[in-house]
Amino acid sequence: MKCPVDKLVLERVGPAEATVGMISLPLPREVASTLRLTHPHSAMQGVAWWERHKVPRRSLAFVIDDKGVPGTLKATTAKRAGGKRPGKAKLVSPWQVKTRITKEKLDYTPHKFSDIASLRGVPAGECTTVEYELELGYGGRSLVLQMGATEKDGKTGPHYWQNVQIDRLWSNEVVEAVRVGGIIYNGDSYLWGDLYLLLFANGVAHAAQHFVTTLLHPESYDFQGLPVIRMGGGNLKPLNATLPADGNRFELGDVTLNLADALTLCSAEHPAKLEAVNGSQFYWAFDRVFNPQKPDCGPLEWAPGTARTVRFQFSLSNAEPVIARYRAPAWWYTLAGEPWPGGFLPVRGRYSVVSDMKTDEIRTKLMTRGRFDAGSAELGNDGFIGSGMLRNYYLTGSPEIFKDALDYCYFWADWAVDHRDFSVHQWIGGWGWKTCAYTKFRDLLMGYLETGDPYLQDGVEMVAERYWTWFRANWPRCTIGRDSFEVSGWAWLWRFFRTEHARERTRELARMLKLVLEERGVIGGQMGAGPHPGYLSSLYMSGVCMISLLEVAEAEQEEGNESAIQEIVGLLHRVHVQFNRSDVELFPSNYNPEKKDWHAYRGTTWACLAVRIYPEMIRLQGHTDDATLLGLSRCVAPELPPITEFASNRAGDGLLQPVFYDPLVLGCRLAGDGVSLEPLGTPEHWASAWSVSTPFGELKITVERQAGQVRMVFGATKRFPVTVRWAGKTIRTTSKGNAVFIV
């Protein structure tokens, strides 16, 4: 079927004064190589792939306009004048980017490197020092950026980054991406400065500055001190200001600074500040450090391996340093295989509201704002919150959700990830607690897809390898259980990055799950013995394994590997038997050998997984059988708690899984100039009302049950063909008609 590119309208989210617009645009495979924006000053850069570095699956789409980017954007697959395809032209950059040494002292006092402990706290004066600054030039204007940090008293200094290197990443007609890095030594320990810049052809720039306590020496050090960004330049006019009290937009002579994205890091209680000193502008993004799992940490104490990102924009021209996001309609994401493959259009109905409720709970009740650890969701912290809320954004288009989701992705990358070895801190259990199961990395992946920030790309790849190492170093074993959480993550890497490496890792992890099931018959709890047991195969662990296998099946489906899909379906049926037992505990911690008739499938924890598992199993195997009908029926059992209680589930479960139920049960897809529906199960499995996002507008469906028949009543602003196939019968009607079936 022809992809309805002519129906795609991207809506601007943000102020009309924005001079730059961008979106991470999903691309259906059939138009991925030819689609472009129709705006004359636009370009695209691939960040995910159908075919590695050849056919993009996601592209960052950019548009610039000094008069203000338009409220809507259209796309086309037609060639540009002269026959150019999108992304082929290279930018002849109007920017100058160079480094300059500001302090050089090559002599040093030798120290005994075999005594590692003595290498901490060596006075800076006894060390080789080669400090740099970064100079950016545009149209006769210039800006100097220099990353630094105080000494451990939080006042002395600052010391600036050393050994700085520029890495030019990519460029197109509209923007170039540059990464700049160097290390800061403050006379005690180390802080890495990693700067990601998007330099737009109209003089606007986006900056994401990462301060990281990474692993430099064999001993892992904490860092004591506060980081600072120094700005300079020939016509810079520094000022003194307190944030957020004095706003977020500042005129600094030839430079206009926009700190709106960084306001989440400060508040009246914990202000940021701009400070003018000797002709330089110093930006202190936060007043102290917080570790959300160590409330008694010192105000200047960065735990080993932690990081913090400061995002902001500036302009070296008359163009306002404001970047507006665009949003795509929900139906467009599904045509590109997100969040599910198969082209099923987004549907709101019985279970779609669970993700909405969980998103609202996280945003309004749990998320920290206004200080160093902004983004933390406290007891809700989970490596799927950013990715889950981004999926909610794709389906709802709410810009507030997008902002908080991206903030969380950066929080997870900065704080949860240990940048010494790329393991992940688990919230439950305390700061020191880490497990294979909770080495979660999908939030890093989704953050990268939205920004192109190489800090996030490097992070997701290294955390994924850490997960693999942990999983594989403890093999063979007959207990896996929730250790299989990020088998799904590797499947996402396969689907978005299209590397042979990710494909091999995913398939090997699936083979290991298969072996456990064949040898033992159940999946186990997780690795471990003794006080960290893993043998008991509870219902929750079985459900986690089933969803991981479904994610692998989606990757195989996109490669057209039917034999692998059916093998996975067979494994799912094996686990299904355990997942539906009434005499097995929900979690190992619930274990009680004397208890009978557990009926855990009457609770939201079980159902929150099942509402994804069974509709997708049916779609993968192509038919309903006794096992999948049982699971589908239990998803709508009258004994289930009210839908409002589903939001009490773990964040990842509440956000990622329930959105599958309604679209996969209804089975609405594009068909010519209309849609076709192939509902699953019986009317008891259907919602009483559905709302479908289509290229032709919203399609509302009401299900009316009467004695001996069921009527589907359709409503829409525009009339278009609707075909319904169910129970061996096909009815053709319109978006303003109805379909009646005899039950």
Image (cartoon, rainbow, N blue to C red):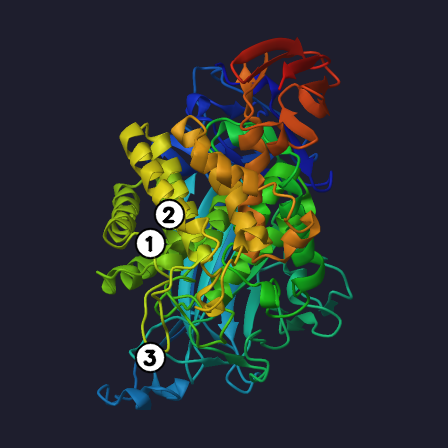
Q: Residue 575 carries which label?
A: 2
The Cα atoms of the two marked residues, 2 and 1, are separated by 6 Å
Residue 256 in view, yes or no: no
Counting from the top left corner in percent of width and height, residue 458 is at 38, 55
* Residue on which the image places disc 3: 128
- 303 vs 710, left or right, is left
Residue 368 in view, yes or no: yes
Q: Quadrant of the C terminus?
A: top right
Relative to 381, is 82 above or below?
above
Relative to 157, is 365 above or below?
above
Residue 212: quarter of image: bottom left
Say what secondary structure mark 2 lies in.
helix
Earlier along the polypeptide chain: callout 1 or callout 3?
A: 3
Q: Which of 223 and 448 is in front in this view?
A: 448
Say what secondary structure mark 3 lies in.
loop
Relative to 61, is 165 above or below?
below
How many residues crowd mark 3 within 10 Å: few (<14), some (14–19), many (20+)?
some
For marks 3 and 2, give the one nearer the viewer. 2
Residue under the point 57% across and 25% down: 40
Earlier along the polypeptide chain: callout 2 or callout 1?
A: 1
How many residues crowd mark 2 within 10 Å: few (<14), some (14–19), many (20+)?
some
Q: Which mark is residue 5?
A: none
Q: Which amino acid does label 2 sit on?
A: Val
Q: Which mark is residue 522?
A: 1
Q: What residue type is labelled 3?
A: Thr
Earlier along the polypeptide chain: callout 3 or callout 2?
A: 3
The answer to whether mark 3 and mark 2 are in CB contact below 8 A is no
For marks 1 and 3, give the one nearer the viewer. 1
